[in-house]
């Protein structure tokens, strides 16, 4: 059978996490319209009778001066060098920019590179051939597959293309494994996703979530207690909202997804804390879970 690992890389907000979720058929990575949504190296495992593909979702390439972002960029580039194939996701709707081409060239090497041109459902059809030509001019690109994760277009074709570059071998994970991340990790990510979605441009990516309590009671209800950590006092005020309205909205939104994910009721309590400029402080980065052996 075919079995191998695939690094999914590209510019921030290109649609990498959405594409992986669709290919795996389960939510293994959070999604938001903001860059830097993905911080960790998250595995999404697709297993059938004939093959197993381990997709490695990586932080998007994004210009930022924080210490956390430096670690994230290091993770993305390291992952792209230690796999059987690289899937470079390029935002077709945004158009093929020089930055995309330069990033694509930077991941070229001995490992086969496949390009998924994403979001074709929201881009002018006349632009598709022009974008394909630009990508094809990059020496070393093995295949280009235009896709729409949202509409499910060409997903099967993309998987078959990826498979053609993977070796024969034994399964890396058991049949029931879909991700390398724990339930506790996913609950924190679900909350972070809802904060990003519900606060829009008001809150930058200086938000972390720490789960303090994750226990299942005798009645089958999970107790989840977590801290939302932001970088500034005014960010805390925005997250809490007037008379606590915003945090109630975010928590209700998150709890629905948590219950869907766990398949059980959730009793959720949240606290919002401020840790000034934590993304630039090594000790706080590690304290909040972003260690070098995890990223």
Image (spheres, rainbow, N blue to C red):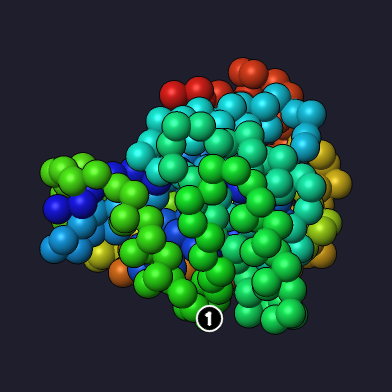
The answer to whether 245 is drawn above or below residue 39 in the figure is below
Evaluate whether residue 93 shows in this view: no
Tell me where residue 74 appears, x and y as whole percent. 59, 27
Query: At 63% across and 79% down in the image, what residue appears?
Result: 121
Residue 184 left/right relative to 36: left
Of 165 and 170, nearer the camera is: 165
Tell me where residue 201 appears, x and y as whole percent. 82, 58
Of 20 and 104, nearer the camera is: 104
Of 189 and 227, nearer the camera is: 189
Quadrant of res 240? bottom right
The answer to whether 169 is drawn above or below residue 262 in the figure is above
Query: At 44% across and 42% down in the image, what residue appears?
Result: 112
Residue 252 left/right relative to 26: right
The answer to whether 254 is drawn above or below residue 238 in the figure is below
Instruction: Find the residue positioned furthest to the top.
Output: 283
Callout 1: helix, strand or loop?
A: loop
Tell me where residue 214 appears, x and y as whole percent. 37, 48
Quadrant of res 27? bottom left
Query: At 82% across and 64% down in the image, what residue appears?
Result: 242
Evaluate whether residue 107 shows in this view: yes
Estimate how packed mark 1 is, as few (under 14), some (14 to 19) or many (20 or more) residues with alpha carbons within 10 Å.
Answer: few
Q: How many marks?
A: 1
The answer to whether 124 is drawn above or below residue 262 in the figure is below
Query: At 67% across and 61% down in the image, what residue appears?
Result: 133
The residue that disc 1 covers is 151
Tell me where residue 66 appears, x and y as whole percent. 75, 29
């Amino acid at each position: 059978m075919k079995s191998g690992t695939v690094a999914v890389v590209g510019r921030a907000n290109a649609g990498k996490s959405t594409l992986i979720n669709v290919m795996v058929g389960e939510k293994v990575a959070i999604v938001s319209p903001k860059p830097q949504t993905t911080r960790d190296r998250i595995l999404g495992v697709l297993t059938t009778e004939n093959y197993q593909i381990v997709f490695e979702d990586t932080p998007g390439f994004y210009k930022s001066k924080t210490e956390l972002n430096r670690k994230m960029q290091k993770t993305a580039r390291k992952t792209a060098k230690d796999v059987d194939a690289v899937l470079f996701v390029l935002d077709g709707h945004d158009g093929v920019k020089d930055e995309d081409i330069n990033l694509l060239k930077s991941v070229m090497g001995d490992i086969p590179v496949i390009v998924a041109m994403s979001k074709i459902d929201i881009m002018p059809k006349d632009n598709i051939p022009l974008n394909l030509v630009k990508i094809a001019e990059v020496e070393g690109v093995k295949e280009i597959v235009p896709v729409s994760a949202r509409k499910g277009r060409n997903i099967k074709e993309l998987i078959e293309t990826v498979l053609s570059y993977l070796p024969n071998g034994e399964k890396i994970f058991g049949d029931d494994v879909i991700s390398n991340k724990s339930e506790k990790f996913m609950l924190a990510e679900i909350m972070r996703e809802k904060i990003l979605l519900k606060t829009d441009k008001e809150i930058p990516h200086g938000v972390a979530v720490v789960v303090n309590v994750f226990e299942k009671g005798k009645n089958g209800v999970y107790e989840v207690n977590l801290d939302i950590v932001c970088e500034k006092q005014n960010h805390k005020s925005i997250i809490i909202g007037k008379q606590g309205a915003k945090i109630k909205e975010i928590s209700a939104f998150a709890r629905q997804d948590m219950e869907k994910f766990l398949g059980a009721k959730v009793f959720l309590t949240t606290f919002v804390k401020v840790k000034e400029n934590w993304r630039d402080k090594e000790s706080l980065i590690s304290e909040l879970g972003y260690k070098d052996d995890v990223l």
